[in-house]
Structure formats: C-alpha cells, structure tokens
Amino acid sequence: MPELTRTLPASWYRSPGLYQLERRAVFLKSWYLLGPVTRFREVGAKVDYEIAQRPLIAFRCSGNGHFPGSHEIQVQCAKTEQSLRHNVTPTGLVFAALGDEAPDFNEYFPDLEPLLQKVNFTKLPYRHSIKYEGRFNWKTMVDGYQECLHCQYTHPSFSVYYPPTSYAVHNHQNFSQHIADPEKPDDGLFLYFFPNCTLNVYGGGMSSFRVCPTNDPNVTRMEFDYYHMESGEKFEQYFKFVRQVALEDYELCEKAQDNLVKGIYSEGILNPDKENGVSFYQGRVFELVCEQYAADQLVQAEDKEATAPQKEPVMIITDVRDRLRQ
C-alpha cells in the first residue's frame, strides 16, 4: 500500500464524480464501528445509522442480560430488512459491513484484537449521542484526526493532558493507533478505523465518531456517541471537555474546506514523521480509488454499448497519479 509524500490535491475534496468513485471503492468495501454492546441494551430498540447513503439499523434481538451477547445483536439494511454482516469483538465492540463487497472482518483488521483487549467495553454505559452537518469534505476531518501538529494551538485544553510534542501515530492494516505519550502507551486508547470511524478512551469515558459523507462533497454529517462510567456531574464535566475539542476541530475543518474550494490551497508536502497517519489513510484512499477506476475502465471496454466515463474523475485521477509519481 502506498504511503503518500504529498497530499491528495484539493480537487479530491470537492468533486461529486470523485466522491462517487470513493463511495464504491472505499465505503461499500469497509467495516464500521457501531459502538459497544452497551449501546444496544433494550430488546427491539433500533439504532439508526447511515453511511455513504446506505441506511442501516442495529438492535438487540433477544436476551435478558445486562448487555447483549454476540449472538443477540442484529444489523439490517433499513430499506430491505436484509441482514448485514457484523462482528462483535470479545471485548464488546460491534462492527458492521454495508454489503458483501467488504472482506472478512479478521482479514480487514488482522491485528486489531490485541489492542482492544486493553479495555472492557461492556463496562462503559451509553450516555448520549449527537449529530450535525459541517461544511467540509469527509477527508478534511480525517486529515485533522490523523495528525496532531494543529493540537497545541487548536486544542489548548487537550494539550495540557497530552502534549503534542510527543504525539505519535502507529499505522496498521486499515486502522491507526494514536499514542499521546510514547512513555505511557497504556494511557488512553485512541484508534482510527479506515475510512471514517474513531474510538477515544480516556478520562473515565469513551467517545466515538463517524465522519459520514453526503452526496455533496462539501458537506459531511458528524455523528458522536458518548459512554462513561459515571453519570450526573462527572459525566457532564467529561462531556463538556470532549465537546470543546470536537467544536475546535469543526471550526478548523470549515475554514480548511473554504480554502480548498476557493483554490487558496491546492496540495502540499507531508511530514513523514508528524503526518504519517495522514499519508497512510490518504494512500489507502488513493490506492482503492485507482483500483476502482481501472475496474470501471475494464468494464467500459468490454461493454461496447456503455456510455463514456465521466471526464471529471478521469482527469482528477490521471492528474494526481502523475504528480505522486514525480
């Protein structure tokens, strides 16, 4: 898998045609974190999700324990009620795929489980969810999560607890582990799941968010779920802190997207040490989109009656492929 030395160009953050390639190449072939089993405590209470214009529901289908077992959770397509593949980890996290194009869960995340064993997610009660749209591309938000160069001036309160000078990102197959302090690798658990999910365990609680693209490449829906050992004032203090960090990122992303749309910023060089997380995930997007484009071209060539492919994604992919080879 290529790790890029330069960022994807701005055109990849604002092109409707390119997003449709991303949707088929990336989103329909991935696995998504839905949450801990504690999110699905009540039998029959459905939780709605929508990823890349695919609505799905997850719910507890049986059982009377404090939380559902791995065989007591169902995930379905919201439109057809067809069952979707899902996986419940031994530590209690629920993941789902949108369809049969995604590989097996253990093939997608072959070395994830040892990291998840650090936390018993069945002990984290669900507290609150929030969702809203932002005027930025989904990759604009992931760019920010996958590096911490911006943390000191954007997240002053977070930087007090986790100084960005020692921040490191370790990349694995389809996920990244963020280590706030290399001398304290067990202090918190911060994970990014390719392409658009995160898990952040610290301060007695856990937050996770999904960066959900819309059909407009300049608009993304953010979905946050919060879990905490405590309720009442202690949870409210935690919630206030993590929401402050999220809103700081939100403001930064909208400003960055504005610059991408206006042409103020086009592309740049990636720092191999401080932005290796960005290089990792952007390289994965680039690889999968190019593979999908090549497959589409083959189908077009075999079908003489097919319409010509859209010029916009063709030009964008050819342009960035040539630049990244320089």
Image: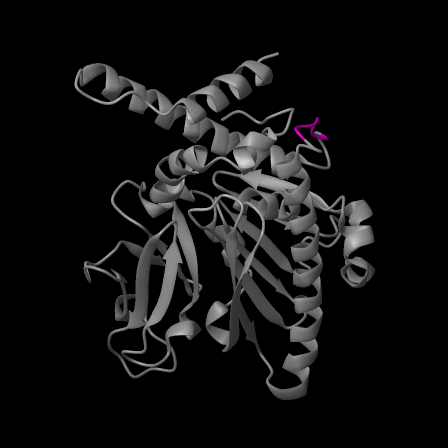
Quadrant in which residue 26 is drawn:
top left
Which residue range is magenta in the image? 266-271
Residue 273 lies in quadrant: top right
Left or right: residue 62 versus residue 6 is: left
The residue nearer to you, when weighing 26 against 205, is 26
Q: Identify whether 258 is placed above or below 18.
A: below
Q: Residue 196 versus residue 88: which sits nearer the camera?
A: 196
Magenta: main secondary structure: loop
Where residue 6 appears, x then y in whole percent?
64, 25
Q: Is residue 86 left or right of residue 229?
A: left
Furthest-bottom residue in this view:
232
Q: Residue at x 69, y 29 (%)?
A: 270
Outermost residue to the top:
326
Which percent across, then down, holds residue 298?
A: 27, 18
Q: Which quarter of the rendering shows the C terminus? A: top right
- Expressed as whole percent of the image width and height from the top left, the position of residue 252 reads 70, 51
Residue 100 visible? The answer is: yes
- Is 69 contained in the magenta span? no
Q: Is residue 179 visible?
A: no
Front residue of 69 and 221: 221
